[in-house]
Image: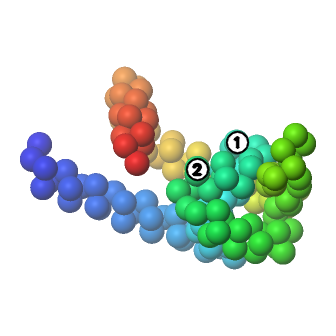
Amino acid sequence: METEQLTRLLIEFYEKFSSWEHGVVKESGLSLPQMHTLEILGADGDLRMTELAGKMGITTGSLTVLVDRLERGGFVVRKPHETDRRSIRVSLTAEGRRLFAEHHKLHDQLTQEILCALQPDEAGQFAAMLSRITTCF
């Protein structure tokens, strides 16, 4: 496959995935970065602000603004780290866990739709390739 064709396919996939994600998140009343914050915390559990910023690929300053809004909305809570007085951990509240579970269910449905287009052995190969590609970013 030529590079140009792969580039076009990647762009088309990104646009479709992005459109789907924006449509699903729009119903929650949160922004896409806010929902991604809940998604990461729901999957990984409590995280230090620096860890969370790293997983999101943003600065701690940008994350502070996101967490402030999510905290005001009652979706997350900040708490001091147990052993490091300089660190703050962020965790989901009950409402944050509820919203994460709802959103995660939609991600699972999308994954099932994608897997329907693949043979069982292709699904494993696809997962392995995505894992390798993700490490490039």
Q: Please provide percent x and percent y for residue 96.
A: 80, 59
Which residue lies most toward the left here? 2
Q: Could you tell me if the residues under marks 2 and 1 are in contact, i.e. CB atoms within 8 Å?
A: yes
Viewer-side label of 2, 1: 2
Q: Quadrant of residue 23?
A: bottom right
Left or right side of 30 for 120: left
Q: Earlier in the sequence, mark 2 or mark 1?
A: 1
Of residues 1 and 121, the one drawn nearer to the viewer in this rendering: 1
Measuring 37% from the left and 43% from the top, which residue is drawn there? 136
Measuring 11% from the left and 43% from the top, which residue is drawn there? 1
Task: Count residues near mark 1 (Cα–Cα under 10 Å), then give few for <14, some for 14-19, many for 20+.
Answer: few
Identity of the amino acid at label 1? Answer: Asp
Q: Please provide percent x and percent y for residue 80.
A: 89, 52
Of residues 99 and 84, the one drawn nearer to the viewer in this rendering: 84
Identity of the amino acid at label 2? Answer: Lys
* Residue matched to label 1: 44
Measuring 89% from the left and 55% from the top, which residue is drawn there? 79
Measuring 87% from the left and 40% from the top, which residue is drawn there? 83
Of residues 99 and 118, the one drawn nearer to the viewer in this rendering: 99
Q: Please provide percent x and percent y for residue 38.
A: 70, 57
Q: For the residues marked 2 and 1, what is the alpha-carbon distance in whole angstroms?
A: 10 Å
Task: Count residues near mark 2 (Cα–Cα under 10 Å), then give few for <14, some for 14-19, many for 20+.
Answer: few
Residue 101 has which mark?
A: none
Residue 55 has which mark?
A: 2
Q: Quadrant of residue 108?
A: top right
**Could you say whether the residue bearing mark 1 is in a helix, strand or loop?**
helix
**Could you say whether the residue bearing mark 2 is in a helix, strand or loop?**
helix
Which residue lies most toward the top here? 121
Left or right side of 3 for 10: right
Task: Specify whether residue 77 is in view.
Answer: yes
Task: Specify whether residue 126 is in view.
Answer: no
